[in-house]
Image (cartoon, coloured by chain):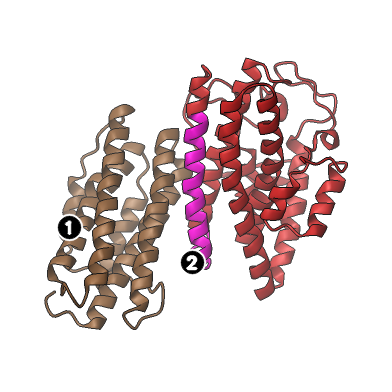
Amino acid sequence: MSGMSVNDRAYAIATFRFISVKLMEIVARWTPTTPEMEVKILFGRHIWDFAQHADTLGKRTFELRQPEQFSRKPVDAYVALLDEMSELKTTAERLGALYDGMLPAIEKRYRDYIAAADPILDEPSIVIMDRIISDLDRMRRDAASLRREHSIAEWNPAAIAGAERGIAHIVA
Amino acid sequence: MADIGTFEIDGMTLQLEPARDDCFKVVRNDRDMSEHDGFGEVARREMVHRHMSNEMTSIDIAAQCLVDFPDAPWPLRMELARQCYDETRHVRALHRRLVEMGGYKGEFPISAFEWCVTSALDSLAARLATQNRTFEAGAMDVVAGLARSLRAEGDEETAYVLDAILADEVQHVRFANRWIKKLAAENPRVLMKVAHAVRFLAEANLRFVAKGGETSVNGKVFAAPEERVPAVNVDDRKLAEFTDDEVQVILRQAGFRTIA
């Protein structure tokens, strides 16, 4: 991503914003249909995390000549993957897909952006993404300890992680 | 609302209950709850358990609003997302207190009445009017009175938890008041939705709320609904931006009893 233009940066950040809003909505959708009180609590906490990520990314788009809270849909395959995840039914599937499959993959995409970004000219984006990465790590640890404490079955996230990795570029 | 179905009762269509742990017995009528009079140990545990359950239901309702109204203004969606987080802290704090008191999750029957009514409404303004502006505002009255009574009974710890929760609820009611006004100013039809929500809730209350003289499963005899209206928490209602006229209406319903 070396030499990203202002437009390239705005579109990438708007794409990350779309994903954050979508994750907020997916977890919100799962909340009423998830029976375990402790998992409902985890989801409720993380709805707010994803909302804050979207909000801070949305403020950054405004600094890059786009509207405030500007979202941009990723490539179709990525939207389809998120929609597919949204349909998962069991608590084990939901926790495994989100926290072991999607979040590590999204974290890597933020790291890739930071690695390619100009450390001076795009420093505000880097600061935002560093904070989001730190949050995502905490959210994964929250989920892992919840699963241990409440003996929730592990679910193999390989398929969803593989599908995510298979999409090289997410910006449409 | 594709994920959870509906049920019919006497011509009304309400939302089926959200998912709950198997340890909970979910009921629909006040009569099937295990509410106790007074502030004995079991009564206080049941009260904390009931509030914990209601907070869980509030998470479900706020989360469902985020799903059902993706085109709502972003600042309003942020408020709802924040509310989800606040309600999780309420559940955790009440569960912590319940365990300290020797209780446990599932010890008493619970109801998700607020979800069944609110989530059956098809506009965000109507849901805000019902859940935040009615149920949560009513809880401000109830919780303030409870905190005071618990302190008088020497249960400072439970009162401390309820008081902290109350401060958060003020904001949940306030943002609903602000947004209903804003949405109504932009589109007067919103007021019709709000009026419909008020009527819908009144109809649901007629079907589920215990009538005077009815008895619960644990032998509590209910006073008439109008006699059960709690004293009004005027200060917090004003902080939540109810107008003076609106506070007067609530006061009249409560026989002008206030939490001074």
Residue A71 bears which disc, if any?
none
Query: How far across and how far down the image is residue B229, in percent?
Result: 80, 38
Please tell me whether residue A170 is drawn above or below residue A101 in the rendered image.
below
Task: Decide whether residue B89 is among the magenta residues.
Answer: yes
Kind of residue indicated by mark 2: Trp
Chain letter, colour red: B
Q: Residue at x 27, y 71 (%)?
A: A124
Asked if badges 2 and 1 are on one and the same chain, I answer: no
Query: How far across and how far down the image is residue A160, in percent?
Result: 22, 50
Question: CA–CA distance between discs 2 and 1?
Answer: 27 Å
Does residue B18 appear anywhere in the picture? Answer: no
Q: Quadrant of residue B232?
A: top right
Chain letter, colour brown: A
Between B138 and A165, the one lying in front of the other is B138
Task: Decide whether residue B123 is among the magenta residues.
Answer: no
Which residues are drawn in magenta?
A: B68-95
Quadrant in which the C terminus of chain B appears: top right
Chain to which mark 2 belongs: B
Please tell me whether residue A22 is drawn above or below residue B44 in the rendered image.
below
Q: Residue at x 72, y 49 (%)?
A: B235
Callout 1: helix, strand or loop? helix
Kind of residue indicated by mark 1: Lys
Please tell me whether residue A130 is drawn above or below residue B147 in the rendered image.
below
Callout 2: helix, strand or loop? helix
Does residue A12 appear anywhere in the picture? Answer: yes
Q: Which residue is mark 2?
A: B74
Residue A108 bears which disc, if any?
1
Horizontal relation, residue B17 to residue A118: left or right = right
